[in-house]
Image (cartoon, rainbow, N blue to C red):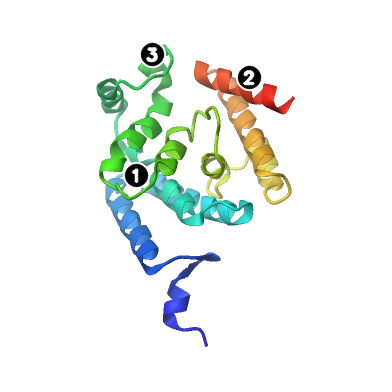
Amino acid sequence: MASKKNKASKMRGACYTPSQLAFIAQVEADLAIQLQSKPKRLAHSMSVASTAESLALMYGVDPFLARVAGLLHDWDKVLSDEELIARAEALELDFGGDDYKDVKPLLHGCVAARELPERYPDLPDEVWHAISVHTTGGYRMGPLDKVLFVADGIEPLRPASKGIEETRALVGRASLDDLFWNSFVGGIIYVLKGGRHLYEGTIRFYNALAAERS
Protein backbone atom coordinates (compact mmCIF):
# COMPACT_ATOMS: atom_id res chain seq x y z
CA MET A 1 0.00 0.00 0.00
CA ALA A 2 1.33 3.43 -0.90
CA SER A 3 2.24 5.57 2.06
CA LYS A 4 0.27 8.72 2.89
CA LYS A 5 3.39 10.71 2.09
CA ASN A 6 3.60 9.26 -1.40
CA LYS A 7 -0.09 9.87 -1.99
CA ALA A 8 0.25 13.46 -0.83
CA SER A 9 3.15 14.08 -3.17
CA LYS A 10 1.03 13.38 -6.25
CA MET A 11 -1.57 15.66 -7.79
CA ARG A 12 -3.31 14.67 -11.03
CA GLY A 13 -0.31 12.62 -12.11
CA ALA A 14 2.29 15.23 -11.16
CA CYS A 15 4.80 14.45 -8.43
CA TYR A 16 5.57 17.40 -6.19
CA THR A 17 7.89 17.89 -3.27
CA PRO A 18 6.37 18.68 0.13
CA SER A 19 7.50 22.29 -0.22
CA GLN A 20 5.82 22.59 -3.62
CA LEU A 21 2.59 21.13 -2.27
CA ALA A 22 2.70 23.57 0.63
CA PHE A 23 3.29 26.47 -1.77
CA ILE A 24 0.37 25.44 -3.98
CA ALA A 25 -1.87 25.18 -0.92
CA GLN A 26 -0.80 28.63 0.24
CA VAL A 27 -1.44 30.20 -3.17
CA GLU A 28 -4.87 28.55 -3.32
CA ALA A 29 -5.69 29.92 0.13
CA ASP A 30 -4.47 33.39 -0.87
CA LEU A 31 -6.50 33.24 -4.07
CA ALA A 32 -9.66 32.24 -2.19
CA ILE A 33 -9.31 35.41 -0.11
CA GLN A 34 -8.40 37.60 -3.08
CA LEU A 35 -11.37 36.44 -5.17
CA GLN A 36 -13.87 35.82 -2.38
CA SER A 37 -16.26 38.36 -3.90
CA LYS A 38 -16.06 36.63 -7.30
CA PRO A 39 -16.75 32.91 -6.80
CA LYS A 40 -17.09 32.23 -10.53
CA ARG A 41 -13.69 33.82 -11.19
CA LEU A 42 -12.21 31.73 -8.39
CA ALA A 43 -13.68 28.57 -9.87
CA HIS A 44 -12.33 29.56 -13.30
CA SER A 45 -8.84 30.14 -11.88
CA MET A 46 -8.82 26.77 -10.14
CA SER A 47 -10.00 25.13 -13.36
CA VAL A 48 -7.33 26.89 -15.43
CA ALA A 49 -4.70 25.73 -12.93
CA SER A 50 -5.83 22.11 -13.24
CA THR A 51 -6.02 22.33 -17.04
CA ALA A 52 -2.60 23.98 -17.28
CA GLU A 53 -1.13 21.26 -15.09
CA SER A 54 -2.59 18.55 -17.31
CA LEU A 55 -1.35 20.23 -20.49
CA ALA A 56 2.09 20.68 -18.94
CA LEU A 57 2.35 16.98 -18.16
CA MET A 58 1.25 16.14 -21.69
CA TYR A 59 3.66 18.53 -23.42
CA GLY A 60 6.76 18.29 -21.24
CA VAL A 61 6.37 21.57 -19.34
CA ASP A 62 6.95 21.99 -15.59
CA PRO A 63 3.53 21.15 -14.06
CA PHE A 64 4.27 23.03 -10.84
CA LEU A 65 4.93 26.29 -12.66
CA ALA A 66 1.92 25.69 -14.90
CA ARG A 67 -0.40 25.09 -11.96
CA VAL A 68 0.81 28.16 -10.06
CA ALA A 69 0.59 30.35 -13.17
CA GLY A 70 -2.97 29.13 -13.67
CA LEU A 71 -3.89 29.98 -10.10
CA LEU A 72 -2.47 33.49 -10.32
CA HIS A 73 -3.32 34.52 -13.88
CA ASP A 74 -6.57 36.34 -12.98
CA TRP A 75 -5.47 37.61 -9.57
CA ASP A 76 -6.36 41.21 -10.40
CA LYS A 77 -9.75 40.47 -11.98
CA VAL A 78 -11.24 41.59 -8.68
CA LEU A 79 -10.18 45.17 -9.36
CA SER A 80 -12.45 47.76 -10.98
CA ASP A 81 -11.61 49.09 -14.44
CA GLU A 82 -10.69 52.42 -12.88
CA GLU A 83 -8.27 50.85 -10.41
CA LEU A 84 -6.68 48.68 -13.10
CA ILE A 85 -6.15 51.72 -15.32
CA ALA A 86 -4.67 53.66 -12.39
CA ARG A 87 -2.23 50.84 -11.63
CA ALA A 88 -1.31 50.48 -15.30
CA GLU A 89 -0.56 54.20 -15.44
CA ALA A 90 1.52 54.04 -12.27
CA LEU A 91 3.48 51.08 -13.67
CA GLU A 92 3.79 52.82 -17.06
CA LEU A 93 2.73 49.67 -18.87
CA ASP A 94 3.47 49.78 -22.58
CA PHE A 95 0.54 48.95 -24.85
CA GLY A 96 2.10 50.43 -27.96
CA GLY A 97 0.11 53.61 -27.97
CA ASP A 98 -3.28 52.03 -27.30
CA ASP A 99 -5.28 53.91 -24.71
CA TYR A 100 -5.61 51.95 -21.46
CA LYS A 101 -9.39 52.37 -21.71
CA ASP A 102 -9.35 50.47 -25.00
CA VAL A 103 -7.41 47.53 -23.58
CA LYS A 104 -9.08 47.19 -20.18
CA PRO A 105 -9.63 43.41 -20.56
CA LEU A 106 -5.88 42.97 -21.02
CA LEU A 107 -4.60 44.99 -18.08
CA HIS A 108 -5.15 42.49 -15.26
CA GLY A 109 -2.46 40.07 -16.42
CA CYS A 110 0.17 42.72 -17.01
CA VAL A 111 -0.50 44.46 -13.70
CA ALA A 112 -0.38 41.19 -11.75
CA ALA A 113 2.85 40.16 -13.49
CA ARG A 114 4.50 43.37 -12.28
CA GLU A 115 3.09 43.46 -8.76
CA LEU A 116 2.90 39.83 -7.62
CA PRO A 117 6.64 39.03 -7.74
CA GLU A 118 6.99 41.01 -4.53
CA ARG A 119 4.46 38.73 -2.87
CA TYR A 120 5.87 35.52 -4.34
CA PRO A 121 9.58 36.26 -4.85
CA ASP A 122 10.57 32.60 -5.20
CA LEU A 123 8.68 32.13 -8.45
CA PRO A 124 10.79 32.49 -11.62
CA ASP A 125 10.31 35.18 -14.26
CA GLU A 126 8.90 32.48 -16.53
CA VAL A 127 5.69 32.44 -14.50
CA TRP A 128 5.27 36.22 -14.60
CA HIS A 129 5.88 36.34 -18.34
CA ALA A 130 3.22 33.69 -18.93
CA ILE A 131 0.74 35.67 -16.85
CA SER A 132 1.59 38.91 -18.65
CA VAL A 133 0.81 37.45 -22.10
CA HIS A 134 -2.04 35.08 -21.25
CA THR A 135 -4.62 37.26 -23.03
CA THR A 136 -2.53 39.10 -25.63
CA GLY A 137 -0.07 36.56 -26.92
CA GLY A 138 3.44 37.81 -27.59
CA TYR A 139 6.71 37.43 -29.42
CA ARG A 140 8.84 34.39 -28.63
CA MET A 141 6.15 32.61 -26.65
CA GLY A 142 7.72 29.89 -24.51
CA PRO A 143 6.15 26.52 -23.65
CA LEU A 144 4.74 27.74 -20.32
CA ASP A 145 3.28 30.83 -22.02
CA LYS A 146 1.49 28.62 -24.53
CA VAL A 147 0.24 26.17 -21.92
CA LEU A 148 -1.32 28.94 -19.82
CA PHE A 149 -2.81 30.70 -22.85
CA VAL A 150 -4.47 27.51 -24.06
CA ALA A 151 -5.60 26.43 -20.59
CA ASP A 152 -7.30 29.78 -20.05
CA GLY A 153 -9.19 29.35 -23.31
CA ILE A 154 -10.35 25.74 -23.00
CA GLU A 155 -10.78 25.04 -19.28
CA PRO A 156 -13.91 22.90 -18.73
CA LEU A 157 -16.00 25.63 -17.11
CA ARG A 158 -15.94 27.75 -20.27
CA PRO A 159 -19.16 27.37 -22.28
CA ALA A 160 -18.57 25.42 -25.46
CA SER A 161 -18.24 27.25 -28.75
CA LYS A 162 -17.08 26.08 -32.16
CA GLY A 163 -13.60 27.56 -31.69
CA ILE A 164 -13.15 26.24 -28.15
CA GLU A 165 -14.32 22.76 -29.13
CA GLU A 166 -11.89 22.74 -32.06
CA THR A 167 -9.01 23.53 -29.73
CA ARG A 168 -10.14 21.01 -27.12
CA ALA A 169 -10.24 18.34 -29.81
CA LEU A 170 -6.60 19.02 -30.68
CA VAL A 171 -5.27 18.42 -27.16
CA GLY A 172 -2.86 15.49 -27.24
CA ARG A 173 -3.20 15.17 -31.02
CA ALA A 174 -1.47 18.36 -32.16
CA SER A 175 1.86 19.83 -31.12
CA LEU A 176 1.87 22.52 -28.44
CA ASP A 177 2.74 25.08 -31.14
CA ASP A 178 -0.25 24.09 -33.25
CA LEU A 179 -2.53 23.92 -30.22
CA PHE A 180 -1.52 27.43 -29.20
CA TRP A 181 -1.93 28.75 -32.75
CA ASN A 182 -5.46 27.38 -32.96
CA SER A 183 -6.37 28.93 -29.60
CA PHE A 184 -4.72 32.25 -30.43
CA VAL A 185 -6.48 32.60 -33.78
CA GLY A 186 -9.76 31.52 -32.20
CA GLY A 187 -9.40 34.27 -29.62
CA ILE A 188 -8.90 36.89 -32.33
CA ILE A 189 -11.98 35.67 -34.18
CA TYR A 190 -13.98 35.86 -30.95
CA VAL A 191 -12.97 39.50 -30.42
CA LEU A 192 -13.73 40.42 -34.03
CA LYS A 193 -17.13 38.76 -33.98
CA GLY A 194 -17.97 40.69 -30.83
CA GLY A 195 -17.12 43.96 -32.54
CA ARG A 196 -14.66 44.87 -29.80
CA HIS A 197 -11.31 46.63 -29.85
CA LEU A 198 -8.48 44.37 -30.99
CA TYR A 199 -5.18 45.31 -29.40
CA GLU A 200 -2.73 46.37 -32.09
CA GLY A 201 0.01 44.33 -30.43
CA THR A 202 -2.02 41.18 -30.95
CA ILE A 203 -2.25 41.98 -34.66
CA ARG A 204 1.54 42.36 -34.80
CA PHE A 205 2.00 39.10 -32.87
CA TYR A 206 -0.35 37.35 -35.27
CA ASN A 207 1.56 38.58 -38.32
CA ALA A 208 4.89 37.54 -36.80
CA LEU A 209 3.61 34.07 -35.89
CA ALA A 210 1.98 33.63 -39.30
CA ALA A 211 5.29 34.49 -40.97
CA GLU A 212 7.09 31.92 -38.81
CA ARG A 213 4.56 29.25 -39.73
CA SER A 214 4.55 29.92 -43.49
Mark 3 vs 2, N-terminal side: 3
Q: Using residue 107 as the reference point, say whether residue 158 is left or right of it.
A: right
Mark 2 vs 1, N-terminal side: 1
In the rendered view, tell whether residue 41 sits above or below residue 210: below
Q: Picture coordinates of residue 99 (x, y %)?
A: 38, 13
Q: Residues within 10 Å of mark 1 (few under 14, many from 20)?
A: some
Q: Can you identify the residue that label 2 sits on?
A: 207
Q: Amino acid at mark 1?
A: Lys
Q: Can you identify the residue that label 3 sits on?
A: 99
Mark 1 or 3, closer to the camera: 3
Q: Is residue 197 visible?
A: no
Mark 2 or 1, closer to the camera: 2
Q: Amino acid at mark 3?
A: Asp
Q: Which residue occupies the foreground of this view, 184 or 194?
A: 184
Q: Quadrant of residue 13?
A: bottom right
Q: Picture coordinates of residue 22 (x, y %)?
A: 34, 64
Q: Can you identify the residue that label 1 sits on?
A: 38
Q: What is the CA distance from the residue labelled 2 to the residue labelled 1? A: 36 Å
Q: Secondary structure at mark 2?
A: helix
Q: Secondary structure at mark 1?
A: loop
Q: What is the CA distance from the residue labelled 3 to the residue labelled 2? A: 22 Å
Q: Using residue 17 as the reference point, say whether residue 209 is left or right of it.
A: right
Mark 3 or 2, closer to the camera: 2
Q: Secondary structure at mark 3?
A: loop
Q: What is the CA distance from the residue labelled 1 to the residue labelled 3? A: 27 Å
